[in-house]
Image (cartoon, rainbow, N blue to C red):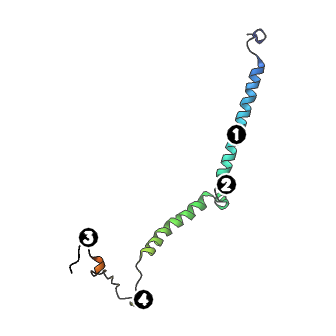
């Protein structure tokens, strides 16, 4: 097939379309680079430079210490006047005594 005999194929629109496509993918590539850079900058520099072994060791230690901190926070402190060998007693709260303010609303008082 001889291209010189084909009058329907004009090289100008093809090159124009190729130029537009190149400009479009260039803009998309620049946008992708910018988004990756912004996402990367969210990670602190110290974490970015650490290797996987260092990160695994650090977070394994954190996971082991965390339950101990929770248990320590939940422990009931001993009163200052109790001796170390004496068990700690927890008193149950007493119900409040009825007063005039605690009467049910809507009832009439007798004179």
Please tell me in which quadrant of the rendered image residue 70 appears.
bottom left
Please tell me in which quadrant of the rendered image residue 7 appears.
top right
Mark 3–mark 2 distance (CA, rounded to whole Å): 66 Å
The crowd level at tag 3 (other Cα within 10 Å; few <14, some 14-19, many 20+) is few
| Number of numbered callouts drawn | 4
Marks 3 and 2, the one that precedes in the sequence: 2
Question: What kind of element bears circle 1?
Answer: helix
Q: Could one spot residue 95 in this view of the protein? A: no
Q: Quadrant of the N terminus?
A: top right
Residue under pointer 4: 80
Q: Could one spot residue 27 in this view of the protein? A: yes
The reply to whether discs 4 and 3 touch (Cβ–Cβ < 8 Å) is no
Mark 4–mark 2 distance (CA, rounded to whole Å): 51 Å
Mark 2–mark 1 distance (CA, rounded to whole Å): 18 Å
Residue under pointer 2: 41
Marks 4 and 3, the one that precedes in the sequence: 4
Residue under pointer 3: 106
For the view shown, which residue lies furthest in the top direction?
A: 5
The crowd level at tag 1 (other Cα within 10 Å; few <14, some 14-19, many 20+) is few
Q: Which is closer to the viewer, label 1 or label 3?
A: 3
Answer above or below: position of 25 versus 43: above
The reply to whether discs 2 and 1 touch (Cβ–Cβ < 8 Å) is no
Q: Which mark is residue 29?
A: 1
In the shown orientation, is residue 53 left or right of residue 110? Answer: right
Marks 4 and 1, the one that precedes in the sequence: 1
Q: Residue at x 70, y 35 (%)?
A: 25
Mark 4–mark 1 distance (CA, rounded to whole Å): 68 Å
Q: Position of residue 100 (x, y in %)?
A: 28, 80
Question: What kind of element bears circle 2?
Answer: helix
């Amino acid at each position: 097939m001889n291209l010189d005999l084909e009058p329907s194929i004009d090289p100008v629109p093809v090159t124009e379309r190729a130029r537009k496509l190149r400009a479009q993918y260039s803009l998309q590539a620049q946008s992708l680079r910018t988004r990756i850079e912004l996402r990367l900058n969210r990670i602190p520099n110290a974490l970015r430079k650490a290797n996987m072994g260092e990160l695994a060791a650090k977070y394994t230690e954190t996971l082991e210490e965390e339950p101990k901190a929770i248990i320590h926070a939940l422990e009931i402190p001993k009163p200052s006047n109790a001796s170390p060998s004496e068990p700690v007693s927890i008193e149950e709260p007493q119900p409040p005594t009825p007063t005039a303010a605690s009467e049910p609303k809507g009832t009439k008082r007798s004179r």
